[in-house]
Image (cartoon, rainbow, N blue to C red):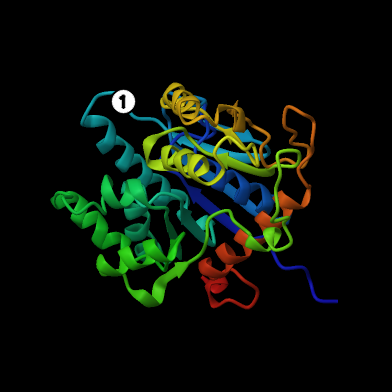
Amino acid sequence: MAPEAAPLRVLMILESGYPVRGGGGAESQLRTLARELRRRGQRVTIVTPRVANAPQARVERVEGIPVVRLPSPRVRGLARLVLWCRFIAFLQRRGRRYHAWHAHIAHWLAAIACAMGDRLDRPVLVKVSGWWELERGVLAPDAGLLARKARDALRGACWTQAISRRIAAELARHDFPAARVVALPNAVDTRRFMHARREASDEAPLQAIFVGRLVAEKGLSTLFEAIAAAFGNSRQLQLRVVGNGPLEAALRAQAAALGIADAVEFLGHREDIWDPEFTDKEGRKNSPEVAKQFQQHVLGGILWALGLAPGSAALAK
């Protein structure tokens, strides 16, 4: 009998707190992937900055997964420089322990990881999610000289995950090598909806759910307008909004003004959104297969992009 393969070791890099109060898309994606990798017997370590809205312990386990938080002084200008230096030192000391590095936000730490990955001979996957990175981050059109240098480093990633074809096209305009850009959807397995019921009535409305921060870039205002235009006050659709943020009051007011307040339910922040036992206020359970299929769909693509699928040459590194 062939010996079992040694577990893979993956370093997850997040330029945000973890876990962070109020949640966030990148944080949720990291959590889902890390938990599923651990469930499959692989080893994951998460490295983040130490930020005010997240736990402050330098090193701890969260849901059994090691989290390393790099401290920096809360002094404008100095904090970023100290964080960068500590991250470089961390990779220099410990980076070779991992088979691959996965950066979940295409920003400064991801750029440093790309540069250090080349130096330490480690594959790096960088995920680009969209609006913030492309318009406000180092990929922004009006980015300064240092940001342009970071962009050059990001182009050197072994793989860049674009969560949509539109983002893949944007990366092409930024001269990212097309052969190393993977268009991999973020947290959606459309097979789950192939047999969904198409008809709706006031007595049996369609069920929809939004999960995310209540901020302008998520486009909830447009979604509310579309619901009002398509369904009016017929109550043929029920939208549950999971998350919180600065626009909650404005969105509640907009729903009321559009006449769809009864069709939109604000559930606030939920820690258990991907758990099989997640329930809404009326006690109706989501299918346990939702989380399972989502995890398997996304995880398989991530492992392939990292070059960590069985037989991959990257494992020799």
Answer left or right for 113 relative to 33.
left
**Residue depicted at x 46% and y 32%:** 214
User: Which is more toward the observer, 300 or 67?
Assistant: 300
Residue 288 placement, left or right of 214: right
Residue 274 drawn at (x, y percent): 68, 42
Q: Which residue is mark 1?
A: 73
Instruction: Point out the image quarter for the N terminus.
Output: bottom right
Q: Residue furthest left?
A: 145
Please identify the quarter of the rendering in which residue 7 is found.
bottom right
Q: Is residue 20 above or below residue 172?
A: above
- Count every numbered label the image shows and give the total: 1
Q: Position of residue 96 (x, y in %)?
A: 48, 58
Q: Is residue 208 left or right of residue 98?
A: right
Residue drawn at (51%, 64%) of the image: 184
Q: Judging from the image, what secondary structure is the residue with disc 1 in?
A: loop
175 to 125, vertically: above or below: below
Q: Nearer the viewer, residue 294 or 21?
A: 294
Amino acid tagged 1: Pro
Image location of residue 164, percent across then percent down: 45, 62
- Residue 147 placement (x, y as % from top left): 21, 51
Q: Is residue 31 above or below residue 100?
A: above
Instruction: Decide: is 314 above or below 54.
Output: below
Give the class, few, some or many, for how many residues have Cα within 10 Å of label 1's Cα (few <14, many ≥20): few
